[in-house]
Image (cartoon, helix red, strand yellow):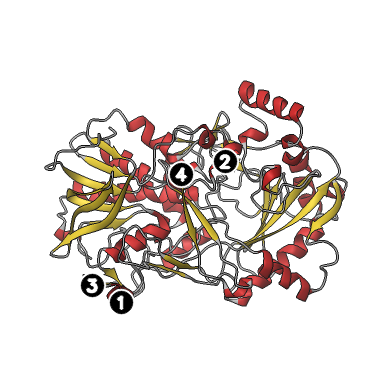
Amino acid sequence: MFLPNSVPADRIYDFIVVGAGSAGCVVANRLSADPATRVLLVEAGPRDSSINIHIPLMVVNLLRDPKHTWPFVTEPQAALNGRRQLWTRGRVLGGSSSINGNVYVRGDPGEFDSWEALGLPGWGWSDMLPYFKRMECYPGGDERTRGRDGPIGVTSLRNFDELADAFIMACGESGQPIVEDYNDGHYEGAAYLQYSTRRGFRSSSAVGYLKPARGRSNLDVLVDSQVARVLIRDRTATGVELRRGGALERFAARREVILSAGPVQSPQLLELSGIGRPDVLRPLGIEVVQVAPGVGENLRDHPNTRLTFECARPITINDVLQNPVAKVREGLKFALRGKGLLSICSATAHVVTRSDEDQPRPDLKLQLQPFSGKDRYARRPEDGLDAHSGFTIGVMGLRPFSRGWVHAASPDPFAHPRIDPKYLDDPRDARVLLAGIKAVRDLASFPSLKRLIVRETRPGEAVASDGDILDYIRETTQTTWHIVGSCKAGTDGGAVVDPELRVRGIAGLRVIDSSVFPTIPSSNTNAPTIALAERGADLVIESWRAGAGRRAQCA
């Protein structure tokens, strides 16, 4: 399955999948299920062999490791006081599903339904539900809406710890509905989170989809191999050029090349291959093969700020990581039962709500994280974890109005692209976060949560006026790493791919990853990305089963 350093020059595949991440592992598995189909999966990073990947809390050890991550950096953000953002993306088998926070959320049914109105028939909630069921193995919930035997393990954190219980009870005291299962279509309300884990271990797309397919003789995987461009002849994708071991090699595809490189690199690869905006390509000396004004545009992410609190009881990750006895206790809990703080790496509970009563759908998420520190993602004292017991409540705008872009910065395929997400460029996004901070403070005043709070440590009670809070928002808002939309699907002039995810104007080329989302469908994007890949693989299989040739696919 894993190819050796030297590969015969005449090796030809039916399908070449670029990127072994959340989507690419799914596509490679489903296409190679037909033994008559030869598939090549190409990944720039290494195998997912690090224990830090598989024990959720330990992933913090990889977040600044260039061997396993892409350390992309944005342009200075005008509305964030000129601050740049580190966009860490997975560079390993499983992609970002191997380094993310594991939170499993399907999303807002209303958002999926809105896609149909945007010219995407077949992408509504009822259309996507069978794919969500197919991908998951969840022992709870209603069998009519939840999957039982899929590749991705799903675990509920119900009754996880005292802090999560207090958060949920306080939400109920504040009038928020308590949701039994937010993934069965009841998206709005307070709930214990669900995780993409199985027996405590991370359930990435590499574990769930690629590992079971490793014995297939018709599936080859190249690791530590970065694709430089798609080869195009007569407006038809014919293969890829990639760098492996310092040398450039070419691999041919009889049927299709499928980009699953993610919302940063899929648009970059299209541009390096001559597909995009002439005003971007020509200054870089790249020949324009297909004018596609939407490539790299429509970039979206969830803006996220936070409040932190000193906890009145030693029940947080801060306490465990600064107490050797507690570390041993948590280690045994994980080793013996697959439970405890080692089985999580971010949040434990959330409430999905509305910033004001006039909102037609939820646009705000408040999320509990059982740790606090100077750095929002600190998990260790040396990273800035608070010395006292502490927890964080993140504030996330779910339906941001701001739109950014990502474009190739150089004809060098191994140079990072330029990224400008334009956080809070639309002032409505800052107002949603302002409403969220006020909502967190209100929630903290209810008895169940108040009894666990000594004080608010960030921003603190001195930050009280709307102006001061907005200043704090501009100084602290960061990425949530929920980047989507840079190769959006649709039928309008800005659409890069059609409803079947085929690149418009180029035959034999598709994009199947979160870059095709026209909007952000969920508060967390990994589950929707895997479901999209399931449906995308079906679209590929159906088109070739029906005898559609490559040229017939040119949209």
Q: Which percent across, then down, holds residue 38?
A: 20, 39
Q: Secondary structure at mark 2?
A: helix
Q: Residue furthest front?
A: 246
Question: Contact (CB < 8 A) between labels 4 and 1?
Answer: no
Which residue is label 3 attached to? 288
Task: Name which residue type carries label 2.
Answer: Asn
Say whether residue 191 is visible.
no
Q: Residue at x 35, y 47 (%)?
A: 44
**Mark 1 — residue?**
283
**Where, quadrant-wise, is the N terminus in this rendering?**
top left
Residue at mark 2 to residue at mark 4: CA–CA distance: 10 Å
Please tell me which residue lies in front, 26 or 358.
26
Q: CA distance from mark 2 to mark 1?
A: 39 Å
| Residue on which disc 2 sits | 61
The residue beneath circle 4 is 68
Per the image, label 4 sits on a secondary structure element best described as loop
Q: Amino acid at mark 3?
A: Val
